[in-house]
Amino acid sequence: MITRMPAKAQSKPPELQERRLDRTVLRTYRATVDLDELIPNPKQPRLGPKEDDELQRQIEANEGIFEPLLVEPHPELPGKYLIIDGDRRWTNSRILAAQGREHYRRIPVEITDRPRATERRQHLGNHSQRARQARRNLRTVGTVYGSA
């Protein structure tokens, strides 16, 4: 279950903000979701253990996660979100919730307005278009300088 805004304001779409992820700019909105609505990314680049006693102590000291997880709508599971950034925070919140601390089940997230796969396709399309334009420019320069 997602918690966004008070019932009166639900008719308005969520206010989107921009967030950078490497060179990509994502449009996101903030919400609070249950741990079970989040799916870890199978292509998580970070290596090493995800369970961290120190991180669990920080989550407890802050009475929850301080920085929201960055998630995207899951491409295959409606109503679920794929974790882009924050897998360790999610893992350690699950551990705390499993220990009977149910108030750690609700997690703040930033939800992208579309899956990154769409963003990647657009990025690749833009990249391809720029590459084609650069080749055209090189041909033009080669023709001008080659004929001189």
Image (cartoon, rainbow, N blue to C red):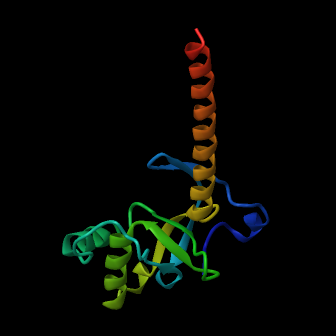
Q: Position of residue 138 (x, y in %)?
A: 57, 27
Residue 27 seen from this side = yes
Q: In this view, does 133 lie above or below 69?
A: above
Q: In which quarter of the image is residue 86?
A: bottom left
Q: Is residue 45 above or below residue 135?
A: below
- Taking depth in this image into account, of 127 and 144 the one nearest to the observer is 144
Give the farthest residue toward the front. Answer: 147
Mark count:
0
Q: Quadrant of residue 60?
A: bottom left
Residue at 34% from the left image edge and 78% from the top image edge: 91
Left of 69 or right of it: where is 17? right
Residue at 74% from the left image edge and 67% from the top image edge: 10
- Taking depth in this image into account, of 58 and 78 the one nearest to the observer is 78
Q: Where is residue 28 in the image (x, y as percent from the top left)?
A: 59, 57
Q: In which quarter of the image is residue 119?
A: bottom right
Left of 115 or right of it: where is 83? left
Q: Position of residue 44 (x, y in %)?
A: 37, 70
Residue at 38% from the left image edge and 75% from the top image edge: 90
